[in-house]
Amino acid sequence: MEIKRGTAVSPGVAIGPALVLDTEGYRIPARFIDRCQRNDEVQRLRAALREAAAEAREKQSAISQKLGKQYGAIFAAHAMLIEDPELVRELEELIQEKRYSAEYAVSQVIRRHAKALESLMSAQFSSRSADLFDIEKAILRCLLGSKSEALRQLTQPVIVLAHDLTPSETAQLDPKLVHAFATEVGGRASHTAIMAGALEIPAVVGLGRFLTDISGGDEVIVDGNRGVLIINPDEETRERYEKTRATISTFYRELSELRDLPAVTKGENSVRVQLLGNIEFPQEVQHCLNRGADGIGLYRTEFLYLNKTTDPGEAEHLDAYLNVLHSLGSGKPVVIRTLDLGADKFAKHVEKQHTEHNPSLGLRSIRLCLRNLALFKTQLRAILRASAYGDVRIMFPMISTLREIRQCKMILAEVKEDLEEERIAFNKQLPVGTMIEVPSAAIMAKELAREVDFFSIGTNDLIQYTLAADRTNEGVANLYSAGDPAVLRLIAQVVDAAGDKVAVSVCGEMSGDPIYTMLLVGMGLRQLSVAPQNIPEIKKIIRSVTLEEAKEVAGAVMKFDTARDVNNYLRDRTRRVLPDVVN
Ligand code: PEP
Ligand code: MG
């Protein structure tokens, strides 16, 4: 049994067989086949060798044309090595006599040859070992297929284990067959993690290297509450987790009884907190309603780009928005955020003049929309048209200067004029909001408050930019904390600047983490927008504390000077209210 710890990003516990997706750059773990499968395995190996050799020859001719014959020759040598009769004989022998899987045989043999070359201590031979590793990867790719193929061909429930998954790959996971996933890299606020929440499957990211220790089919446990992956659990651990799984489902069943109750604090001075849901797809509106959400506080429309190669048109935007309004029913608001493309979200659709060294600091999100007015106006038209049919509000992401929000409003006014001319209905008083997710916006919140109707604090990016710690990089996860006093002071500043003039909510992952609920309410927040699966426990905490307690917590927290002290204190205070939700 082996236990790995990472970052819990989507709650729940799953137990099942592993599907290991990534192989590139990793050792293929020991795997054996049944005696009766040997001939089929040899055929599989031969097919993969043929395919890998053909690919190498294609590369040879492409590179020869582009760079010259001497470079193409490298790949000709690859093809010859792949087809080398001695190598083929060795591989087939391991399959026939030792019952190795084709992948394991390839990995073992090629790596042995590579090591032998490296040990010759000659620069010329060492560099040849890199070629051998390349060949190994090429054959393994042919044997194992691409990640998406592996995901499409699922027939039985699995737990997906990968080095990394992109948001698009995560979205392709079928929750009926993929019961959980765990990755070596990634952070709490990565979009992959957010997608896991949307699919409502347990997930842990940022586990560090573990793929080398596991074979496909091994039993694993993913604990999405505590951020733990257990490989080949012993009987006792397995039983313990079976029990935890049952307890968790009872706990969630109990929480579901709160569905129709409002999120109000206890006691005489009770205050009402509006609990809204964050969604990426229209279908998730139902997840929010099932848990008693007061509306949608963040609709991440960039997910309209998922698995698309072209920009969605006005009709496609409008269709999605009307779909959301229809599912939501009348009287509940939806905050539609304009496209937040770039950085780790669907960056490949984004046409850039040059590759950026720092995509998170580059031409992303609203910056991209302001440079691509056709794309921007298409979406604004659709949002305005949808506003004729329900309580729609518009929000601009990643605003970092006053000038940007003014530009957005100007373009919105132009689009309104166009619609008026065309006699198309829309809400002339459409509320306009801005995300506060860049430190400059938090600092300028007083001025921004004069420009908009509401603020939504995007802590995922605010933490990243305040602490200069990439939200997707587990290597700096120790710095990336919502409890950091610098982040908390910025939030306090924004709440203060908003005053009574503009409504303010928090919509980053912080608002869905129960340890921060008392703090946020104590700091004066009366609107929280959270992933649907977090709504019940956040509501439970709000209903379990008085406003005075929340204020006392906030008062104490603002005196701490490190994230560690803040988080320890908050964990302790939350544990007293709701022991089951604290890691
Ligand atoms: C945020 O940055 O906190 C946020 C809500 O937006 P996203 O996670 O989509 O960047
Ligand atoms: Mg953001």
Image (cartoon, grey):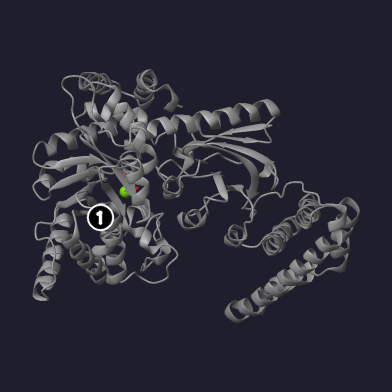
Residue depicted at x 61% and y 49%: 157
Position in image of residue 388 (x %, y %): 16, 62
Residue 228 position (above or below residue 458)? above
Drawn side of residue 55 relative to residue 225, left or right: right
Residue 354 falls in which quadrant of the image?
bottom left
- Look at the image and tell me whether residue 484 can be seen: no
Residue depicted at x 47% and y 30%: 250
Position in image of residue 430 (x %, y %): 13, 56
- Where the N terminus falls, by quadrant? top right
- Counting other residues with Cα less than 10 Å from the Cα at mark 1, is it few (<14), some (14-19), or many (20 or more)? many
Front-lying residue, 568 or 453: 453
Q: Residue furthest bottom?
A: 65
Residue depicted at x 28% and y 44%: 458
- Look at the image and tell me whether residue 574 can be seen: yes
Name the residue that disc number 1 marks. Answer: 336
Question: The residue under label 1 is which amino acid type?
Answer: Ile
Residue 510 falls in which quadrant of the image?
top left
Task: Identify the secondary structure beneath mark 1.
Answer: strand
Position in image of residue 54 (x %, y %): 71, 75
